[in-house]
Image (tube, rainbow, N blue to C red):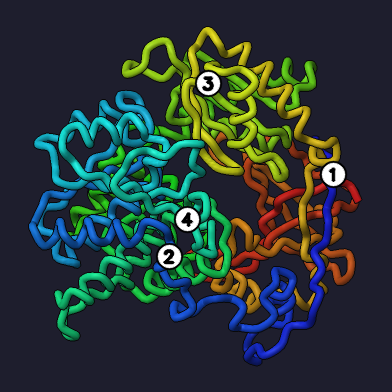
Amino acid sequence: MIRALTVIRRKSGSEPYGWPDHVHPVLRQLYAARGALCPDDLGHRLAGLLPPQSLSGIDRATELLADAIACQQSIVIAADFDCDGATGAAIALRGLRMLGAQHVDYVVPHRMLHGYGLTPALVETIRPAPGLIVTVDNGIASHAGVAAAKARGCKVIVTDHHLPGENLPEADAIVNPNLPDDAFPSKNLCGVGVMFYLLLALRARLRERGVFLESNEPDLTSLLDLVALGTVADLVPLDRNNRALVEAGLRRIRGGRACAGVNALIEVSGCSAKTLSASELGFSIAPRINAAGRLEDMSIGIECLIADDASRAHELATILHGINAERRSLQDGMVADAEEMLEGIAFNNAIGVALFDPGWHAGVVGLVAARVKERLHRPAIAFAPAGEGDPGALRGSARSIAGFHIRDALAEVDAREPGLIVRFGGHAMAAGLSLRACDFDRFARCFDVVARARLAPEALQPLLHSDGELTPDEFDLDLGRQLRMSGPWGQGFPPPLFDNLFECAGWRRMGADDRHLRMQLRDPRDGRIHEAVMFNAESVTPGASAMRVAYELSVNDWQGRESLRLLVRHMEPA
């Protein structure tokens, strides 16, 4: 079965100019279609980074941090349990130590015991009470946790990027580009990006205080491999500013200057540091860190990222690799459960889809929601029991489609049914929430009502945006190499996707569970056969007649030999 899907071709409004001769003409057109008409538009130079001064709250935050360093107060980083939070905690620890902090540590909540963010339960675990707590990638909704920390005599700096509610926590400083009236031009920084900016501003303040001589000012660009990893992992839009951060981080990794933990994760994932792409950061490296927060303790991931000893980093990366394998197995079972449920959902024609199974694991529901969203092209929320720390409660993770702001939708549910949602937070495409188990059916009905009101019928038609056809001579290994090393491609700056007519000359299933396809696709224009793969294609069977195929042009490395390969995203009868 091949799902119906509309392919729309991108158009470039202007001609590219000023590119060096070695840049492939196809790549120039790809950049132009994404608004980058010349090399300067890519924003690859760190000199073009937005300055940190316009972030509201950053002056107060750097004052508190500079005073804490001067007095050698204890500082505790309160991290989140995803890759963005882990990389943010790692650069906070590394950066603050580089800037002179001698007593800096971290704490990270256990998903099943403490819940999300800086909760009172997490604050209680911090013994003795530190002088300063700094949140990373969380805290904007942690009213009770901030109050609990203040009651113990701690000062609190909240650094976050999630959308705030109507009221802000009573922290001593809040740094978040998405605060109301914040003047920072880019609203797309993720948690690790906000922390990196805070470190840049702190270095400037310490410079003003005369702490550094020219010869000993720390080089914070050494943290950019971690900034790139967290930024790609969190799926924030790669606007000009984020592209500069990610591109600089990739240059460090490819140049052999990544930290020991990143190098170890690259090795256990089977990737090559020299040719690492942004997509490999997101699909190969980040899941191994995220798995720790989903199933175990994210401190394993943070310890890997702050390890300086290569053997210790490799030991921790190997543990993360094993946890990720367990996560995949658990996810497969939960997705199979969801597939069975969806038969009933499809019959009822739900627009906003909410699923719950008492046997599901709360750490994996976000991945299930993502798969459901992809299959149905509907906003989806998957729920699981919250665990021992919150008996009788459900924890949900939401994923959305274009045109449906999931956090705003949850806010509308909350307004329609006050008290139904215990707490929620997030942004346009992803959110988290909790509610009482007895209220699941009522929530599911209300969420569907809100989705029906907010989504026009045309928004429910899945779309693929294609860059058009490649000519026979453009199926070129040099172009494949340039596409792999260019970009960086990601959210808001999508990877190149082409579509052509092909005939299937042969295919077979591959993988331990036969979920993937390997195909030989013949170009009818010249008869040339191209190797192709399609992952997670258990419901797809190639047809015997001509097909319209949407694909990425990739390079396959096998035993030191490079070859061109098509990574198929969709195919349908021509």
Q: Position of residue 91 (x, y in %)?
A: 29, 58
User: Which comes before the other along the chain, label 1 or label 2?
Assistant: 2
Evaluate whether residue 91 shows in this view. Answer: no
Q: CA distance from mark 4 to mark 2?
A: 34 Å
Answer above or below: position of 444 versus 466.
Answer: above
Q: CA distance from mark 2 to mark 3?
A: 45 Å
Q: Quadrant of residue 428?
A: top right
**For residue 90, above or below residue 246:** above
For label 1, the residue is 543
The spot of residue 70 in percent (x, y) is 11, 62
Distance from the alpha carbon under mark 3 to that under mark 4: 26 Å
Classify 10 Å Cα crowding around label 1: few (below 14), some (14-19), many (20 and above): some
The residue indicated by pointer 3 is: 421
Q: Residue at x 85, y 67 (%)?
A: 527
Q: Left or right: where does residue 229 sit relative to residue 365?
A: left
Task: Look at label 2 and name its amino acid.
Answer: Ser
Q: Is residue 508 visible?
A: yes
Whichever of callouts 3 and 4 sits on the residue coming sooner in the sequence is: 4
Label 4 packing within 10 angstroms: few (<14), some (14-19), many (20+): many
Give the distance between the C-alpha atoms of the residues marked 1 and 3, in whole angstroms.
47 Å
Q: Nearer the viewer, mark 4 or mark 1?
A: 4
The residue to which callout 2 is attached is 272
Identify the amino acid type marked 4.
Pro
Residue 57 image point, x, y percent: 37, 56
Residue at the disc numbered 4: 177
